C-alpha cells in the first residue's frame, strides 16, 4: 500500500471517527432526544447556519471549538412528515471547557414559562413553532444569559435506528406501563417491570413517558440517563464496531447543525468526558394558568445554573478582558 493510499484511508477513518463520536455525544447530550445526522455518502455532515451568522450576538468574535470554550444547544423536535411548524420536545444546553476538557449540561423542561422574544410569556416549546431553531436559540440565550455558539436540531427517527442497529439496549424499569409509539398510536408500546432489552421504538417510548410516572419530568430524566448510559456502553464495546456502518447509513435526513467538519473533529478531545457529563438542574414547580399547564422555573435556581454555566465557559472573564482592552 503506497503512502498516498494510507493517508487517504487514515483521513477517512479520522472523519468517520469524528462522526461516530458526535453521534455518541449527541445521544448523551440530547438525553435521548431524537438524534440524527445528515451524512453525505456515509461520510459527514451537512451544515445549516443560523440567520444571525457565525457568532452569537453575545460574543465579540466567533468561537473555535479547537481552542475556545463553547456551548451547544440540542433541540429535539417532535416533527412529523409534512409538518412545516413543529415544537421542540427537548432542549439541552451543554457547555465545554477546553482546559478542564469537561462538559456541563442542563435540560430545560419543554413546558417552562419563559419570555419568547416577540411573543411574550409562553411555553419554551412554542419558540420552535413560532420561529424555528433561530428563535429557539435566541430564547435560550435570553433565559440563561449565555451565548449559544452552536446548535444541533434532531428528530426521533435516528434515535430509533441507532438503538436498533446496536441490537437494542438493556434497562431496568421500576414500573410497567404502556405508551404511544413514534407514529402517535396510543398504548402501542408495552414496557414491563424489571430488566429487559428494548428495541428502538420501545426505547423511545421509555424515555418519553412522563404522565404515568408520579415523578413526572424528574422520572423521565432518570430514564433518559439510564438509556444514555446503556447506549454509550454498548456503542463503545468491541461488538458494536462492526455495526457503525449500519448506524451511519441509518441516520438519513434528520439533523441540521452549524457544526463544520473541523468543529466535529475538535470534539474528540472531550471523548474522555462523555461518560461523566455533569448534569445541572433548574428547579421549578407546576403553575397552571387559565387551564393551561406551565412549569415555573425558580428564579434562584435559574440564576445559579446560569452563573455556573457562565463560569464554566469563562464568559464573565472574557467580558471583563474585553472591557479592559
Image (cartoon, rainbow, N blue to C red):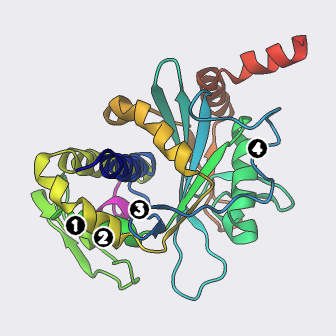
For the C terminus, which image quadrant? top right
| Residue in the foreground of this view, choosing between 8 and 3 | 3
- The vertical placement of 115 against 71, above or below, is below
- Residue designated by label 3: 43
Tag 4 secondary structure: loop
| Residue in the foreground of this view, choosing between 96 and 110 | 96
The residue at 65%/66% (across/down) is: 292
Q: Which residues are magenta?
A: 203-215
Q: Earlier in the sequence, mark 4 or mark 2?
A: 4
Left or right: 309 as drawn, with respect to 136: left
Q: Earlier in the sequence, mark 1 or mark 3?
A: 3
Q: Nearer the viewer, mark 4 or mark 2?
A: 4
Q: Quadrant of residue 183?
A: bottom left
- Residue designated by label 4: 55
* Labelled pair 2, 1 in contact (Cβ < 8 Å): yes
Mark 3 crowd level (few <14, some 14–19, many ≥20, 10 Å Cα): some
Q: Using the numbered discs, state the Cα–Cα distance from disc 1 to disc 3 in whole angstroms.
A: 17 Å
User: Residue 10 at x, y = what percent?
Assistant: 33, 46
Mark seen at residue 249: none
Tag 3 secondary structure: loop
**Going by the picture, which residue comes out furthest to the bottom?**
82
Q: Using the numbered discs, state the Cα–Cα distance from disc 3 to disc 4 in whole angstroms.
A: 26 Å
Tag 2 secondary structure: helix
User: Residue 316 at x, y = what percent?
Assistant: 74, 20
- The vertical placement of 12 against 99, above or below, is below
User: Residue 308 at x, y = what percent?
Assistant: 60, 24
Residue 206 is inside the magenta segment:
yes
- Residue designated by label 1: 165
Amino acid at each position: 500500500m503506497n503512502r498516498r493510499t494510507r493517508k487517504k484511508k487514515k483521513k477517512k477513518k479520522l472523519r468517520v471517527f469524528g462522526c461516530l463520536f458526535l453521534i455518541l455525544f449527541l445521544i448523551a447530550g440530547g438525553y435521548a432526544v431524537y438524534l440524527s445526522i445528515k451524512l453525505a455518502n456515509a461520510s459527514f455532515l451537512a451544515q445549516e447556519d443560523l440567520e444571525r451568522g457565525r457568532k452569537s450576538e453575545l460574543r465579540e468574535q466567533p468561537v473555535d471549538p479547537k481552542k475556545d470554550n463553547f456551548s451547544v444547544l440540542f433541540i429535539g423536535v417532535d416533527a412529523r412528515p409534512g409538518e412545516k411548524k413543529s415544537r421542540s420536545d427537548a432542549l439541552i444546553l451543554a457547555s465545554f471547557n477546553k482546559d478542564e476538557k469537561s462538559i456541563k449540561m442542563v435540560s430545560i423542561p419543554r413546558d417552562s414559562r419563559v419570555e419568547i422574544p416577540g411573543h411574550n410569556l409562553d411555553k419554551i416549546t412554542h419558540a420552535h413553532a413560532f420561529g424555528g431553531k433561530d428563535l429557539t436559540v435566541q430564547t435560550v440565550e435570553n433565559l440563561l444569559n449565555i451565548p449559544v455558539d452552536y446548535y444541533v436540531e434532531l428528530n426521533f427517527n435516528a434515535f430509533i435506528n441507532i438503538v436498533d442497529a446496536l441490537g437494542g439496549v438493556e434497562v431496568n424499569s421500576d414500573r410497567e406501563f404502556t405508551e404511544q409509539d413514534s407514529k402517535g398510536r396510543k398504548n402501542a408500546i408495552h414496557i414491563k417491570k424489571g430488566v429487559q432489552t428494548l428495541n428502538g421504538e420501545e426505547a423511545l417510548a421509555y424515555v418519553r413517558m412522563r404522565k404515568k410516572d408520579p415523578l413526572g419530568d424528574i422520572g423521565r430524566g432518570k430514564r433518559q440517563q439510564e438509556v444514555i448510559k446503556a447506549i454509550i456502553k454498548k456503542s463503545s464495546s468491541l461488538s458494536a464496531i462492526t455495526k457503525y456502518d449500519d448506524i451511519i447509513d441509518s441516520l438519513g435526513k434528520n439533523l441540521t447543525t452549524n457544526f463544520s467538519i473541523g468543529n466535529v473533529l475538535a470534539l474528540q478531545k472531550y471523548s474522555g468526558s462523555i461518560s461523566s457529563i455533569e448534569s445541572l438542574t433548574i428547579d421549578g414547580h407546576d403553575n397552571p394558568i387559565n387551564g393551561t399547564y406551565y412549569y415555573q422555573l425558580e428564579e434562584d435556581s435559574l440564576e445559579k445554573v446560569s452563573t455556573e454555566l457562565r463560569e464554566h465557559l469563562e464568559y464573565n472573564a472574557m467580558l471583563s478582558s474585553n472591557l479592559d482592552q
